[in-house]
Amino acid sequence: MKPATPLDPGTARTWVDVDLQRIADNVDVLRSRLPPTTDLLVPVKADAYGHGLVPVARTLEAAGVWGLGIAALDEAAALRGAGVRSRLVGLMPIHPGEAARALDLGVVPAITERAQAEAVAAAAREAGRTAIVHVEVDTGMGRCGVWDGDSVAFVEALRELPGLEVEGMFTHFSSADEAERDHTDRQLARFDAVLSALAERGFRPRHVHVANSAAALRFRGASRTLVRPGIVVYGSVEEIATDPGDEGMGFDGADFVPALSWHARVVAVKRLPAGESVSYHRLYVARGEERIAVLAAGYGDGWPFGLSNRGHALIRGRSVPVRGAVCMDVTIVDATPFPDLEPGEVATLIGRQDPATRSVVDVAVESGLSSYAVFTGITARVPRRYRKGDQDVRG
């Protein structure tokens, strides 16, 4: 693959490639499976899962998704500053002191307690407007939100607050990506009971969203007016447990293509005599003479320290093991199979080097992390290069 500007292909130490066309294509696949009355609220929080907040948001905006999900108002400010005009929905609580800023940025706040609602309503009245909000109902996540047993009275009280309009309601699933289905089924039932009780009182929210990627793909009835597909938009479905009994949208994992790959340059190659150790803590000692290659990516770049002496990378389409401890700036791998390997060649940490592939889930399993943690852990000093198919684009 030809490296994209502004990176110099001869000098870049490590970089991430993001194919924005693949993100757009994954959105198309999702839409093809959704009911016609359902749209997409796509999370772009945490730098769009490490893929790049602004470039991904612009891609999703061009794809016409209903809205973008954020976790922090600084994310909203970055998007507005970049000219992104899409609807922004907060998926995490705001502090009451942030209410006026949320309204100024055009964010639909997630309301999880009374103090937030009162602050948002007051800020809206001060501005002479009505604030649109979504209420989070806790049905078994045990994190944020009003417990389902208290939520009917809570919503009824919010509807009496001048300056506030409850447009939407949502809940978060704790384990929709796991093989065991009972808890998610119970969460769905608890949420539906809240909606039914409110309907009896004459209130039906305009928007309802419960489904993350796993729930949309696996559970019948999880797709409401909106779904919140995160990881699947970025092309990773391997961590989602599926079985033939799943009744969601129906999918083949191959339909969703990873958008991100991560590469690092070989910066040194050397002989490792028998009995010599590698890196900090002497975690690896050569039993016989080997060759090692030093790759220009370490935990300072987000390459997990947990891969020490157990991870792998790809060189010339072949999987090679990590030797010793991952360092802040470099990782050492076995280069014995390549007697002519020279500095300057490129190793792949995540992605494909024909005929081999290393997925983000491979890295997650070996490091003891989740794929979400691997993606979002790629640090800001790793430049992202963007393309749409074969065309280089600006980030």
Image (spheres, helix red, strand yellow):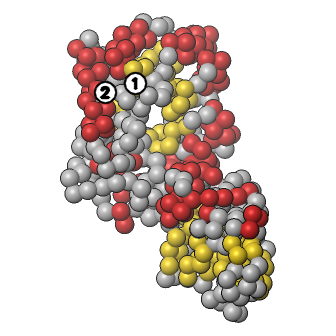
Q: Secondary structure at mark 2?
A: helix
Residue 137 visible from this viewpoint: yes
Residue at the location (74% across, 68% down)? Answer: 282
Q: Given the image, on which type of amino acid does mark 1 rest?
A: Val
Within 10 angstroms of label 2, few (less than 14), some, or many (20 or more) residues?
Answer: many
State the image coordinates of residue 296 (x, y, percent, origin top left): 74, 69
- Quarter of the picture containing the C terminus is bottom right
Residue at the location (79% across, 74% down)? Answer: 11
Q: Given the image, on which type of amino acid does mark 2 rest?
A: Phe
Q: Which residue is mark 2?
A: 191
Measured in 3D between alpha carbons, the distance from the residue under mark 1 to the one under mark 2, in whole angstroms, is 7 Å
Q: Mark 1–mark 2 contact, CB under 8 Å?
A: yes
- Quarter of the picture containing the N terminus is bottom right
The image quarter containing residue 321 is bottom right
The image quarter containing residue 206 is top left
357 or 289, which lies in front?
A: 289
Q: Which mark is residue 137?
A: 1
Residue at the location (58% across, 13% down)? Answer: 119
